[in-house]
Amino acid sequence: MRYQYLASALGALLATSSAAPLSEPTTASDTNGDKYSLTEVGARNTLDWRIYLNKDGSPASFWHDVPLYPDSGNSSVINFVVEIPRWTDAKIEIKRDEPLNPIFHDDSDGEVRFVESIWPHKSYPFLYGSIPQTWESPNFNHSFTDFPGDNDPMDAFDIGNDIGYVGQIKQVKVLGALALNDGGETDWKVIVLDVNDPLAPFVESVDDLEEYRPGVAEAYRQWYLYYKVARGDGVLEIVGEEYQDASFAARTIEESHGFWRELVAGEVDSNEISYNQTSLPEFANSFVETVSTYDAFDIPRESSIEAAAEKPDEYDHWYYLDDEYELIVLPGEEVGDDD
Ligand SMILES: *[C@@H]1O[C@H](CO)[C@@H](O)[C@H](O)[C@H]1NC(C)=O
Ligand SMILES: *[C@@H]1O[C@H](CO)[C@@H](O)[C@H](O)[C@H]1NC(C)=O
Ligand SMILES: *[C@@H]1O[C@H](CO)[C@@H](O)[C@H](O)[C@H]1NC(C)=O
């Protein structure tokens, strides 16, 4: 009953495999017949830049129109929306308050944001992104963390060998999850592995991973603890300290999917989220006919890409921490300036 509405949307996805990384995102699509494509407008590294999703050739939302489960019978495999490809540092994400939630470059005080590199890591060491049709609701305290949600979809990171591209939609296995407390908000980070990665047949959990990729899970756990130190936010807390296991992570995702259903059904305070969607007519409060979206929401019909703006030099920098995770600052050195 619960997932009945997904059945029709899911059928065609069952045989899907991940698309190969493409250098030109506007022509990106899933390998099983142009399921998804992207429309990119503006210049990268600017506030006006956007990537919009098209599903079967029509505008759709990365958040609300990509099904959570590519195979409705298996909650350990989910769809994953890549926002930040591996080894890049631009803070790119889904825009929660714009119709159909395009991808944009996040800002801080009007400037585009990049993540600082803290030794030994350079930029994002994995593919980072979000889990469609989930919601970390800020309307109540999460039962595991006792903190309200951060009002975004759940986040995930793919530890496989694919580099990925912005807006890529791929199928991944859920291996576990970290319950991050980011400034008093619940912010789950689910560790996942591309189903097409050569490692995927051998790994179902963080423990399995240890056998083939020793130290990787712990290095990434550390990355989340201190990646905000250089911008002055301090070390983050991980509720429960360690990774929660794969079945707990899968249940938490399923629960979050339920919170999202209440959102698109228009049953709860949406906290300024734009929850219009084009694929679930049964949710009449949020459904929009695809043909009307171009005009109603001012969605571009074609890509028009401009040359990327330059990234500020200050991000080509390595920060070092002492054994208390404090930034090491040389006498007279100016670092950690967020501006
Ligand atoms: C779900 O998919 C995973 C990964 O392909 C597989 O190992 C597992 O056996 C599947 N579970 C079910 C219930 O089909
Ligand atoms: C959430 O927990 C905090 C304490 O961490 C408490 O002050 C607050 O009232 C709780 N909020 C709700 C909605 O229960
Ligand atoms: C979009 O969803 C909102 C609720 O967020 C609803 O009020 C509005 O009618 C929808 N827009 C369109 C064009 O249907």
Image: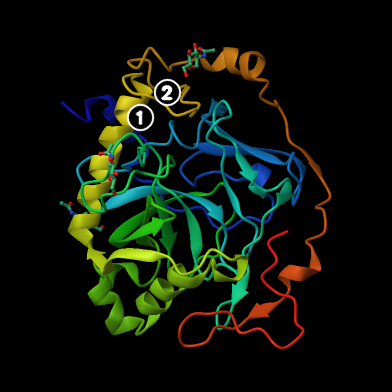
Q: What is the C-alpha distance between the residues marked 2 and 1?
A: 8 Å
In the rendered image, the vertical position of residue 168 relative to residue 260, given as above or below = below
Q: Secondary structure at mark 2?
A: loop
Observer-nearest residue: 237 or 14? 237
Disc assigned to residue 9: 1
* SS of the residue under disc 1: helix
Residue 27 lies, with reference to residue 5, above or below; the image says below
Q: Position of residue 297 (x, y in %)?
A: 63, 19
Residue corresponding to mark 2: 279
Look at the picture and state if 45 lies above or below 122. Answer: above
Picture coordinates of residue 259, whole percent (x, y)? 29, 34
* Residue 62 image offset from top left, x and y in percent: 50, 37
* Comes first in the chain, label 2 or label 1: 1
Identify the amino acid type marked 2: Ser
- Residue appearing at x 73%, y 43% in the figure: 47
Question: In the depicted view, which residue is nearer to us: 94 or 29?
Answer: 94
Position of residue 290 relative to residue 64, above or below, is above
Tell which quarter ligand 1 is in.
bottom left
Left or right, 11 with respect to 65, comes to left
Left or right side of 148 for 3: left
Quarter of the image where one finds residue 255: top left
CB atoms at circles 2 and 1 under 8 Å apart? yes
Q: Nearer the viewer, residue 12 or 42?
A: 42
- What amino acid type should be assigned to the residue bearing mark 1? Ala
Give me the residue at 20% from left, 49% from top.
Answer: 251
- Within-10-Å neighbours for mark 2: few <14, some 14–19, many 20+: many
Tell me what residue is drawn at x 73 percent, y 73 percent: 316
**Dot 1 alpha-carbon crowd within 10 angstroms: few under 14, some 14 to 19, many 20 or more:** some
Check the picture and name the quadrant holding the N terminus: top left
